[in-house]
Amino acid sequence: MALIDNATSSSASPAPGERTASKRVELQLPSRLGYEKVAMNTAANLARLMGFSEERIEDLKTAVAEACINAMEHGNRLDDSLSVGVILSAGPGSLEIKVTDTGDGPSHSGTSTPHTPDIDKKMQEQETARGMGMFLIQALVDEAEWGSSPPTGSYARMVIHLHPTTA
Ligand SMILES: Nc1ncnc2c1ncn2[C@@H]1O[C@H](COP(=O)(O)OP(=O)(O)O)[C@@H](O)[C@H]1O
Ligand SMILES: [Mg+2]
């Protein structure tokens, strides 16, 4: 795990209390189910340090776990020699999490999810229980985006704000 302080070293060192640069934590996980918990708990610990409420931390844990499982399963096809990258950047008012894999990414990149699952149908088992991950991620974080960064792979990027603006 790498902890990188992104504070840019300008000629004058910042006065106490002026250090607003982001703190970065990076993980590399094997693409094996279960390892998403390492990312989930790291994200939770960082969010707790930043002062997020336990309720928001629960949302974050679910979103991070779903993004990691997608990266392992769909991106890296559960080949545990391929890594899933998790980059957590703690800024002054928000936490950004980028989950990377070596695949092509979802066919619907950007900020829209492929389709809104029908929860009633799922409960009645008329629709498969799959297909909830991206929908959940979008519902639980303040910003969600999917994209590919050829030739290296694809990413899911999520942001949660310490003080969400109520629209
Ligand atoms: N990291 C990824 N790489 C490639 N495809 C992805 C990735 N994440 C999601 N997808 C695609 O989007 C679909 C929807 O994902 P999700 O909502 O999590 O449902 P599920 O994982 O249950 O299929 C997946 O079935 C897959 O086709
Ligand atoms: Mg999924």
Image: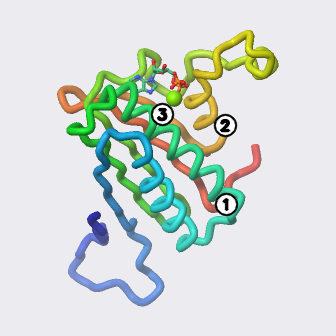
Using the image as rendered, state which of residue 61 and residue 91 is in the foreground: 61
Using the image as rendered, state which of residue 22 and residue 59 is in the foreground: 59
Tag 1 residue: 163
Of the numbered discs in the image, which one, if any, rests on residue 36? Answer: none
Tell me the kind of residue under disc 3: Glu
Quadrant into which the N terminus falls = bottom left
Does residue 119 sit above or below 101 in this rendering?
A: above
Disc 3/disc 2 C-alpha distance (Å)? 12 Å
Q: Secondary structure at mark 1?
A: loop
Tag 2 residue: 139
Of the numbered discs in the image, which one, if any, rests on residue 145? Answer: 3
Tell me what residue is drawn at x 23 percent, y 37 percent.
82
Q: Residue furthest top?
A: 126
Does residue 59 sit above or below 110 in this rendering?
A: below
Label 1 CB less than 8 angstroms from ligand 1:
no
**Chain-order first, disc 1 or disc 3:** 3
Tell me the kind of residue under disc 1: His
Disc 1/disc 2 C-alpha distance (Å)? 16 Å
Colouring used for the render: rainbow
